[in-house]
Amino acid sequence: MKFVVVFLVLALLAIPACFPDFGTGTFTERSRTYSPDSTKFLLNYAYEQGAWDGGRSYFIAILKITDSVESTASQYKFFSYDVDDVYWQGSDTVIVAEKFTEFISRGKSQFKDSIFPMNGTIVKVVHKDPIDTSYERKVFYRETSPSQKYDLIVYRYVKPGNGYYFLNISVIHRNDSIPKYGNFYVSRFDFDCFNDIRWMKGDTLDIKVSEPCFYSFEDYLVKNRRDTGIKYKVQVNDTIRGNITY
């Protein structure tokens, strides 16, 4: 079972913006958003195969009204986990807002080009910071390392009416300002890997994570970390309800 989990998590992280069809499965159309001239549309659909994402994966495809939907969608699609939004700008341009937390965590875009053609349409990739002045930063946990050199901060941005606040974890030199986004970890794929994090002796981070995250833990950390020399110990614990809260 562990090997299956490892394979699925690693494969999910390796998915590019556009990729070949999965094979045999169940196609379910969810919605269409037509271009202003009604010659093309953005197709939001689900594809069930029994393994990915609990058996169902979600996609957005750029199609012409003359395209055969099921046979063409797989050629011109984006994985929903890779984007925050996809919308029309005129009738010949589609704006793709790359998932911002993924962009911050990776330190670079997963798209090779910021502008490229797809099925007779120009695709423009943008990065939209989701945290504006309407959000307030809420610190859930703060602790100074045993040597008094570093501060560990666990925080989210909150505002009324928003039910999901992605997790940020930063390690900074003591009394430095808190970075806007976590410099150690930022939630990706709309779930939090961490269940608890705190200091232990030797300025080492004691980390408890969910099982799926354990096997590819390094892939979830911010790539351009300033203090890459920080040591940490990672354990699987799916039952603890530590200092990672909503």
Image: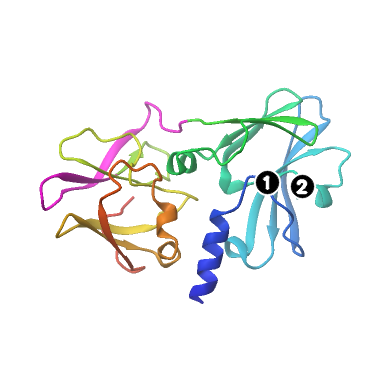
In percent of the image, x 64 and y 60: which residue is there? 56
CA distance for labels 1 and 2? 8 Å
Badge 2: residue crowd in 10 Å (few <14, some 14–19, many ≥20): some
Residue type, numbered disc 1: Cys
Residues at badges 1 and 2 in contact (C-beta under 8 Å)? yes
Closer to us: 96 or 158: 96
Q: Which residues are magenta?
A: 129-154
Residue 163 higher or lower than 125, as above or below: below
Residue type, numbered disc 2: Gln
Q: Quadrant of residue 137?
A: top left
Residue 222 higher or lower than 28, as above or below: above
Q: Quadrant of residue 23?
A: bottom right
The residue most toward the right is: 66
Circle 1: element type: loop
Q: Is residue 133 magenta?
A: yes
Residue linked to disc 1: 18
Residue 131 higher or lower than 235, as above or below: above
Horizontal relation, residue 5 to residue 122: left or right: left
Circle 2: element type: loop
Q: Which mark is residue 233?
A: none
Q: Which mark is residue 75?
A: 2
